[in-house]
Image: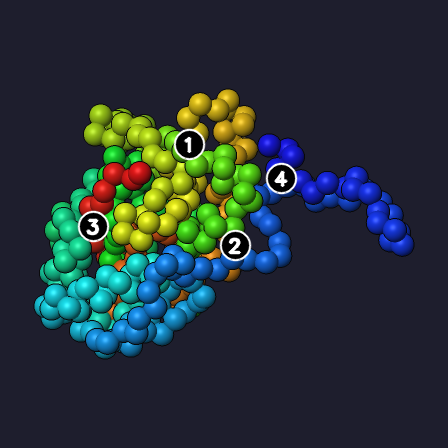
Amino acid sequence: MEDLLTTPTDAPATAGTPPLRPHRIPADGLYEGHRILRRTPDDWPDRPYELFDVVPQSATIGAEVRGPDLSRPLSAALRAELNRALLEWKVLFFRGQHLTSAAQRQFASYWGELETNPLLARGDSKEVVRFDKAAAGARTFENVWHTDVTFRERPAMGAVLQLHEVPAAGGDTMWADMAAAYDNLPLEIRERIDGARAVHDYLPGFSRFFSASQLAPLQGEFPPVEHPVARRHPETGRRMLFVNASFTTRIVGLPEAESDRLLRLLFQQAHVPEFQVRFRWRAGDVAFWDNRATQHYAVFDYGTQRRIAERVAIAGDRPY
């Protein structure tokens, strides 16, 4: 892989051009210069939204949706247009919804069966995960780019998160567009990963927070699984990177050192600012994201202030 990650320094100087001394920067998987920023597939029709207003928050990912009251039943037309917005923007933000837990679950259920997660603190029902940063002994599931539950055979299709209490400053959440991340990889890397598969396991991501005695009983329920390194979105057809630093452990068929190096390069793609959106929460705000197409990062920069959130996840399909 060395040839793919470094810039040649021995190219001959053209006539009239002074020679340059050898120069290079150690490869880290990030590439400066032009970015390809496609929000949708090239053949995707560009249609206006008719039932709500959309305020883009970045070039390719993240939009605030103004108009719908998520506490009320969704008509078929509204649900379809919201789904199109989700596919086009990957994460949708709804200000000031103040949903009850039942209303949050009802909204999420329009997109499919709701997941449960035995590894995380429960809210008022088995489908609700509660993150209470001020609770005694609360764990910090923050400060890492990841896609939720890729250790499942069928990772979550999406998630609906509501903030009930927010710090005076800090506590933002960031999302990264993994279709843009794939588009901007060098051709040699894309050719290398197309068709490749990687192993995902819950143990690396949760061993920082739980003891071996707590994790061992779940090994039978969550054995390691394989997913494509670059999956295809089942609704848009786009290719997207589908590895993450919390749960992806190795690329099948590669020696350990080579697998580690390629994964480090791929993990880095979520760190590119042009592929990201950052959301500053207010109490009662809701975010709905496409877990198939994104990674996210909860920023723990608020010290001892309180941050309370509840999440409902929607069961997904088997990546291909």
Residue 27 location, quadrant: top right
Q: Nearest the camera: 229 or 130?
A: 229
Q: Which numbered disc, 1 or 2, marks the residue closer to the eye?
A: 1
Q: Residue at x 17, y 55 (%)?
A: 111
Residue 182, x across and y down, in percent = 46, 47
Q: Which numbered disc, 1 or 3, marks the residue closer to the eye?
A: 1
Assign a secondary structure to mark 3. strand
Tag 2 or tag 1, which sits nearer the N-term? 1
Which amino acid type is shown beneath numbered disc 4? Leu
Give the number of the disc on residue 196.
1
Assign a secondary structure to mark 2. loop
Assign a secondary structure to mark 1. loop
208 versus 70 height, above or below:
above
46 to the left or right of 111: right
Tag 4 or tag 2, which sits nearer the N-term? 4
Do labels 3 and 4 touch, CB within 8 Å? no
218 versus 304 height, above or below:
above
Give the CA distance from mark 1 to mark 3.
26 Å
Return the residue at label 2.
272
Give the CA distance from mark 1 to mark 2.
23 Å
Return the residue at label 4.
5
Q: Residue at x 36, y 74 (%)?
A: 55
Give the CA distance from mark 3 to mark 4.
38 Å
Which amino acid type is shown beneath numbered disc 1? Ala
Do labels 2 and 3 touch, CB within 8 Å? no
Tag count: 4
Which amino acid type is shown beneath numbered disc 2? Val
Residue 38 location, quadrant: bottom left
Tag 4 or tag 3, which sits nearer the N-term? 4
109 to the left or right of 263: left
Residues packed near mark 1 inside 10 Å, few (<14), some (14 to 19) or many (20 plus): some
Return the residue at label 3.
314
